[in-house]
Amino acid sequence: MAGFLLHQGATVMCVHGGQATPSTPNPRVTVSGQPTALLPLPWSIAGCPGVPPSAIPPCVLGQWIAGTVRVLSNGQPLVVFSGSGISIPNGTPLLPTASQTRVSAE
């Protein structure tokens, strides 16, 4: 999947407004001076309130399920803006809203 690479400083949110950041940034590839994120590694989500009226638990972790297919780092695909990710434990989507726009990968 082609798209701009997501890095540690990118703005990624769960649908409830929690801020997601890579738990283990990838220092081998940097964009805009910040490390990128590898697809199989989890993201931490902070500040998610969940949905109290329906008792949906807050998002705690995020996992990307689609990223680069031709560009790898350390043998792993990278996370891209156009990729898709879900939050754990409730499975709602992760929404990238701002990232660098100079480096793209397929």
Image: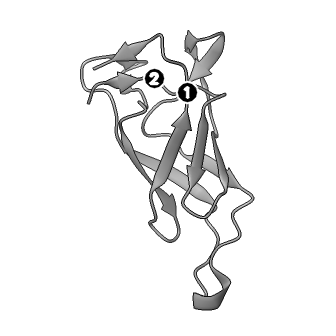
Residue 13 location (% of width, % of height): 59, 50
Q: Which structural element holds mark 2?
A: loop
Residue 61 location (% of width, % of height): 59, 56
Q: In the figure, residue 43 lies in which quadrant?
A: top right
Q: Give the residue type that dot 2 points to.
A: Leu
Q: Give the residue type that dot 1 points to.
A: Ser
User: Which quarter of the figure is the N terminus placed in?
Assistant: top left
- Residue 99 marker: 1
Tag 2: Cα neighbours inside 10 Å, few (<14), some, or many (≥20)? many
User: Which quarter of the figure is the C terminus placed in?
Assistant: top left
Q: In the figure, residue 98 lies in which quadrant?
A: top right
Instruction: Give the mark nearest the N terminus, 2 or 1.
Output: 2
Residue shown at the point (51%, 28%) measured from the top left: 6
38 vs 3, nearest the viewer: 3
Residue shown at the point (75%, 59%) measured from the top left: 47
Residue shown at the point (62%, 37%) measured from the top left: 11
Tag 1: Cα neighbours inside 10 Å, few (<14), some, or many (≥20)? some
47 vs 73, nearest the viewer: 47
Residue corresponding to mark 2: 5
Which dot, 2 or 1, sits closer to the camera?
1
Looking at the image, is 31 positioned above or below residue 78?
above
Looking at the image, is 76 positioned above or below residue 34?
below
Instruction: Say whether residue 55 is left or right of residue 83.
Output: right
Q: Which structural element holds mark 1?
A: loop
